[in-house]
Image: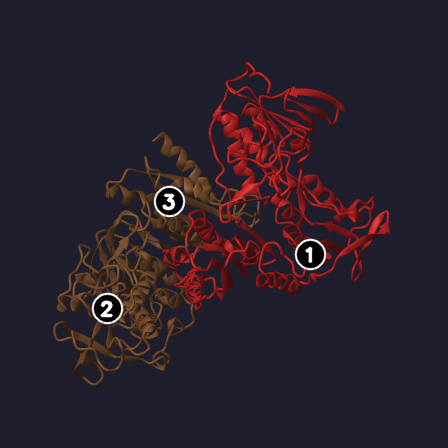
Chain colours: A brown, B red
Amino acid sequence: MGAKSAAGSTGRIVIIGGVAAGMSAASRAKRFDPGAEVVVFERGDYISYGACGLPYVIGGEVEDFDDLIARTPERMRGQGIGIRTGHEVTGVDAKAGTVTVLDRAAGRTTTEPFDRLLIATGVRAVRPDWAHTTLSGVHVLRDIPDGQAIEASLQGKDGKAPKRACIVGGGYIGLEMAEALHARGLNVVLLEKGPEVAGRMLDTQLQRRVRAELEAKGVDVRCGTAVEGLTGEGHVTGVQTSKGLVRADLVIVAVGVKPNTELVKAAGARLGKTGAVAVNIRQETSVPGIYAAGDNSESLHRVTRRKVHIPLGLTANRMGRVAGVNMAGGDATFPGIVGTAIFKVFELGAARTGLTQAEADALGLKAVSVDVDSTDHAGYYGDSRPIHVRLTAEVGSGRLLGVQLVSPRHISVKRVDVVAALLHRRSTVQHLFDTDLAYAPPFSGVWDVLLVAADKLNRKIKTA
Amino acid sequence: MGAKSAAGSTGRIVIIGGVAAGMSAASRAKRFDPGAEVVVFERGDYISYGACGLPYVIGGEVEDFDDLIARTPERMRGQGIGIRTGHEVTGVDAKAGTVTVLDRAAGRTTTEPFDRLLIATGVRAVRPDWAHTTLSGVHVLRDIPDGQAIEASLQGKDGKAPKRACIVGGGYIGLEMAEALHARGLNVVLLEKGPEVAGRMLDTQLQRRVRAELEAKGVDVRCGTAVEGLTGEGHVTGVQTSKGLVRADLVIVAVGVKPNTELVKAAGARLGKTGAVAVNIRQETSVPGIYAAGDNSESLHRVTRRKVHIPLGLTANRMGRVAGVNMAGGDATFPGIVGTAIFKVFELGAARTGLTQAEADALGLKAVSVDVDSTDHAGYYGDSRPIHVRLTAEVGSGRLLGVQLVSPRHISVKRVDVVAALLHRRSTVQHLFDTDLAYAPPFSGVWDVLLVAADKLNRKIKTA
């Protein structure tokens, strides 16, 4: 590790990656130790943007990609943080305490010293072999340039304006893009290799509701369909699948992400079993003084007490804050996650936290679930809408394990947060049932659907 | 106490009052001990209705008063529960184990034995001296007949159809009726004696938002205005106030409620300091074998560890269940409340749980609050709306004390439940901040507004 620089009490803090984790870390480090020198190297041209908003720009809910940008380089520089966009870190020498940096515009490489290093390089979209293609009209969606490329395709800048979209993958991105492209007037086919969409997120009962919503809105969903290749010359014309050819002049490949760990490995730091970076609760890697945070890193799942790799925006921001404070000489810890996730597809909201029944089974837990179909507001109230809750607990202990919700009023599933809070505080089904939840007819039934589910699950646990 | 009847293992269970607590108790008792004889005496003609829905029937959000009825006498009888509507219990003899019952239609009084008794007599609307009037067009709103009487007035059945309504009292009922009568096309004046509306519910900062919403919708809100009397001959024509005469041909008196405790006193059971019935955690009064539950009873506030009287529908239902199980020979306990409440007035939702700053101050707690103005969904997302959060904690311990929210998308304030859950589990501001709340742009910012408030409050506590 390099000697402390004269610039500040904690010396020179170098951050690789300027999106969620990286920028949170930079801000926190500078706030904690205003004397520290903080420099951020970002390979791309944009920093500090909400990647989760990309499908909504394409769909038209958000006007412009620039609207996703939370903090501009100018503003960060005004806070005394060095921002170098277009600068790609290509190597790390942990012993020497230096990184090798390529100025992409100038094509020039320099060596930069650090006292503390944060590797916040995020994830990349997985591209199967068949998706390594020179055909235009084939996209992934991970960052703003990806979004801009899709927008350019939609406007016909790489050929004719497309009419038929094929989305490969039924996870969040695939689902959100199905809605976005449908909103842009395209015919949309969604291909999913597994038996249902939202496969990693929900149990089968709720996956089906998600698919039903897509189909009701006119999306052609084909599950159990594997992609074998693409057709076309110059521009894509179709997707070859295990069940025949799907004609398409726009293809979105959304089959997952994997952590960018090359620099972590170069630094000699350890990866976890998940394939993401192993960090301690202070976000430090196995190499002292080198930290990792954000989508490339593992986190502790507080329900299972296992390390998991669930890259999400809030987690990345939290990890970045913790790393920033610690790099600046403070002592912050990341308490872990409980596996909360939420998405909207057309009118339908879906959310989950903790474990699904399938996940609990896979971990060998003795879990039991109940399903409740009710209304989000008082049943007699004019605008009440259906809501489905699936609540899961451990037999014997009654420990709350998780909840899943779907509702055609999407924001009604934000109730998931109540269970997330209780999971953080290691609670039982009885604790949930005892909770004084807010009731008035325009908001819920007397017994909020979460309480109805807890009551039913309590009875089931006792007889299990 | 009377001898156990031959009818069942726990004998004869008599329940006075057939609305929320009474009917919950009846159902639970019968389910717990199918051999028990369960008889409910209800003074009125309706049982088991959601009184909280009354303003929405008048406003038109709910079609008919009958829609509020959850369980009919026929259905309850089908479960083997004796339902005697139109039967008023006029006396209790605890030693003899009997109640005196007046059959109101027949004008006949009988004596009925009980082994266990539940007094679930609820509350009555407070009528100040000036509201004891023979003028037509003057109403309170507590039960279905009250609602029907207001509906009759609105239809001109007691004179001409009214054009100008005056509501006295700016609590829930007053606010909800302001919206309902405005929806029916009346000019509405709302009078409040105190300095602001929603006085017992929110701190001043948020009270003002509620008043602003009323005023924006055209309700004439006059705070600091005391009522001195009514004017009119036959039908009401106006309300005389400390600030002059308010012309009105419909007057709703909504100045609070008080517990119906006459029968409790007759039974020799103790009242608490709040004036409501003192019960233990099994809902038993100071007289063994005599229980009380619902709006007439005190409950334990889990944040302050004090007994409070906060009559609300969910609490009444919970208390009734507990009393029912215990009367049938089981052992259930009521865990208490955390002071959660929620209401909607026009587009605005308002909610609170725990303590307000004013309440914490009054209790001598060293509390501190922060206010956050943010958006309910991601700021850049098309339909995001403002939300105001006021979060309160104890200095030193960092213990979470309460939260208040207002938002023009009313259901966004249902987030209050997250803090309610954490209050039940006695948590700190840090616990809230650490919670893995659900994020996607159509649901919240990356940092849900509750997390933003927790972060701000954490900093304020440290410097306090």
Q: Chain of mark 1?
A: B
Query: For the view shown, which residue lies furthest in the right direction?
Result: B233
Residue occupied by mark 2: A121
Task: Residue B7: tell me if it is visible.
Answer: yes
Q: Which mark is residue A196?
A: none
User: Judging from the image, what secondary structure is the residue with disc 3 in?
Assistant: loop
Say if mark 3 contacts mark 1, CB within 8 Å.
no
Quarter of the image with the N terminus of chain A is bottom left
Residue A183 location in percent, x, y?
41, 63
Q: Which mark is residue B182?
A: 1
Residue B134 drawn above or below residue A290 = above
The part of the image, by quadrant, that contains residue B406 is: bottom right
The part of the image, by quadrant, that contains residue A319 is: bottom left
Amino acid identity at mark 1: His
State how far apart marks 2 and 3 are (Cα): 35 Å
Amino acid identity at mark 2: Thr
Query: For the view shown, which residue lies furthest in the top direction?
Result: B6
Same chain? Circles 1 and 2: no
Amino acid identity at mark 3: Ser
Mark 2 / mark 3, whichever is N-terminal: 2
Decide: few, some or many residues near mark 3? Use Cα within 10 Å; few <14, some 14-19, many ≥20.
some
**Residue sitting at x 14%, y 69%:** A267
Q: Chain of mark 3?
A: A
User: Judging from the image, what secondary structure is the residue with disc 1 in?
Assistant: helix
Which one is in front in this view, the residue at disc 2 or the one at disc 3?
Answer: 3
Residue B148 location in percent, x, y?
71, 42
State how far apart marks 1 and 2 are (Cα): 56 Å
- A117 relative position to B203: left or right: left
Which one is in front in this view, the residue at disc 1 or the one at disc 2?
Answer: 2
Which one is in front in this view, the residue at disc 3 or the one at disc 1?
Answer: 3
Residue B130 drawn above or below residue A17 = above
Decide: few, some or many residues near mark 2? Use Cα within 10 Å; few <14, some 14-19, many ≥20.
many
